[in-house]
Image: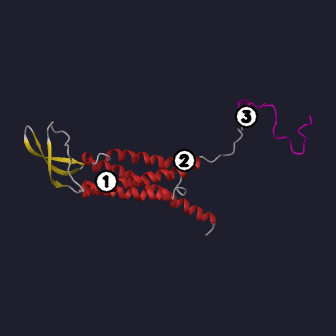
Amino acid sequence: MTGEQESGGGRATGRRLLVACVIGMIAVAVGLWAAGSLVWVHQRYRTPFSGESVAEVTGSTIRGELTPLALATLAAIAAVLATGGLMRRVIGLIVLLEGALLTWRLVDWTTGAHGVDELPGTPPGTRALAVEGVVPYGPILMGACAAVLLLCGLAVLVAARRMPTMGGKYSAPTAEREPSDPDQRIWEALDKGRDPTENDDPPEGGDPRSS
């Protein structure tokens, strides 16, 4: 295999990694929003007016960072596409840390108390009581999002230079083309501060100083 073929294969692999990371992070943003909207627990509470009742507590109440992290993931997608090199590695590290944060928050909730002290939408003086039941779908979705973020962050961190940059193929300098229209050449020469009557390319075999 020639060096050119190896380079082309590396670019193709980097492109596939970038596409996979972007798709994965879009799925994470949607998943975190969904995890925050799902009911995580049914918790009993007592109000000073109606006595005891059971409330449905959503993920955004239990883990308030879910929606902000969903928005941060969308911003990270744009940053990964627009940057390259060291800056892209920094973004990959941030994504990796986001996945680690979600993992820690999920483990902390799983091993600790499942309920909340304050229930939104309840009148003043409401007292939160015991948790009646746990709905596992939200926490499972949060854990899946954390795993995808860890994989995407690691991929961006390791393969940042192999991934193409958005618009990178248009960033290479191109040779300036001389317009074919004589009038257009005159105006462009004037725009660049040159004398349009001067000929930069003297005839072959001739002396540019001769008249």
Task: Answer left or right for 53 relative to 104.
Answer: left
- Picture disc at residue 167: 2
Which region of the structure is painted magenta? 187-211
Q: Given the image, on which type of amino acid does mark 2 rest?
A: Gly
Q: Position of residue 120 (x, y in %)?
A: 20, 41
Task: Answer left or right for 188 relative to 12.
Answer: right
**Is disc 2 in contact with disc 1, using a CB cutoff of under 8 Å?**
no
- Picture disc at residue 31: none
Q: Position of residue 154 (x, y in %)?
A: 45, 58
Residue at point 28% right, 57% down?
Answer: 140
User: Which residue in the protein does label 3 denote?
Assistant: 185
User: Which residue in the protein does label 1 denote?
Assistant: 105
CA–CA distance between discs 1 and 3? 66 Å
Q: Quadrant of the C terminus?
A: top right
First in sequence: mark 2 vs mark 1: 1
Q: Given the image, on which type of amino acid does mark 3 rest?
A: Arg
Pick whichever, 9 or 75, lies toward us: 75
